[in-house]
Amino acid sequence: MSLAFVILSACCVSYGVAFLLHVLSFSEILKRGYRAGSVMLQTGFLLGTLYFLSQGFQSGYFLPVVNMSAALAFFAWALAFVYLVLLGKARTESFGLFLSLLLCGLMSGALMSFGHGRGIQAMVRDHPYLLKPTFVLHVVSAFFAYANFAISFIASLLYLIECRELKKKNASNFYFKLPSLERLERLVCLPLSWGTPLLLFATATGLVWAKHAFGSYLFLDPKTIVTFVVLGCYLLILYRHWVASIRGKEMAVLSLIAFAIIVAGFVETFFLFGKHNFL
């Protein structure tokens, strides 16, 4: 059993315990479970950081998409970073409940796919262009963009759930555990304002890298096309938010639609031929 697998396992367990503690707190079985759950979320994040640092020191490269396991683990790490560091003051019990479940699921996928696919040395040997600085910038900025969009997606779901509960004459206990609509709206909009420029930067660096690596900008690559569509959607959302002053429910619905396109784009990566399906 390798050290990397042990660290990933510990990280997954930390997120799983965080989810359990949030459930116990949410159901009022353990009143202080939320605080303990937050500590376990932070522990999982630190273990994820340790994993990537150890991999970097061991191989001499920082390449978080060397295989599916590493890609899932890095996406989970980016999600935890955005939530714990960038949105630290906006953390809520209900949001932590949903996020810890998602993080646990991502890390479970990373564990199940661990050892499958090529290692970092083989990837670098077969694809030396992956070590280009523009590629690393492209990958990191893209993952953080998608992490921000995922945070906005979760907040949008909670926002629509709370709106539905408000329309009921007798709201369920779940409603009283949700943060205010104003706070949720901030969690919908703020990550979008961070993620959109990051995706724009990721797209630009990806095109520059593709030109150097393949002699073409890969405009017709399926993932490139989907990325342009996603980028256009989020730019339109921000335009309507800043110029047309749309807020609340409409922002939440548009965020859900845009994130659904992202998920569809990731699915097509595995079934359509293109330069993005090397994992």
Image (cartoon, rainbow, N blue to C red):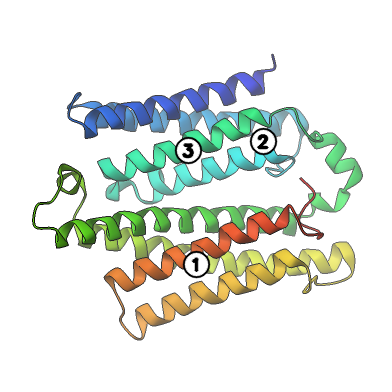
Do residues under tags 1 and 3 come within 8 Å of each other at their CB atoms? no
Tell me the quarter of the image containing the N terminus.
top right
Tell me which residue sits at (70%, 44%) in the image. Answer: 65
Q: CA distance from mark 2 to mark 1?
A: 25 Å
Q: Amino acid at mark 3?
A: Leu
Q: Is residue 113 left or right of residue 193?
A: right
First in sequence: mark 2 or mark 1?
Answer: 2
First in sequence: mark 1 or mark 3?
Answer: 3
Tell me which residue sits at (32%, 29%) in the image. Answer: 37
Disc 2 element? helix
Q: Is residue 239 left or right of residue 168?
A: right
The quadrant where residue 106 appears = top right
Disc 3 element? helix
Tell me which residue sits at (28%, 59%) in the image. Answer: 159
Q: Residues within 10 Å of mark 3 (few under 14, many from 20)?
A: many
Q: Nearer the viewer, mark 2 or mark 1?
A: 1
Is residue 35 visible to the viewer in this orientation of the structure? no
Q: In the picture shown, does residue 223 fall above or below 4?
A: below
Q: CA distance from mark 1 to mark 3?
A: 21 Å
- Residue 241, position in %: x, y? 36, 78
- Residue 258, position in %: x, y? 50, 67
Q: In the picture shown, does residue 3 fall above or below 133?
A: above
Q: Amino acid at mark 2?
A: Ser
Please name the residue that numbered disc 3 is placed on: 103
Please name the residue that numbered disc 1 is placed on: 258
Please name the residue that numbered disc 2 is placed on: 69
Do residues under tags 2 and 1 come within 8 Å of each other at their CB atoms? no
Q: In the picture shown, does residue 40 fall above or below 97?
A: above
Q: Residues within 10 Å of mark 2 (few under 14, many from 20)?
A: many
Q: Which mark is residue 160?
A: none
Q: Residues within 10 Å of mark 1 (few under 14, many from 20)?
A: some
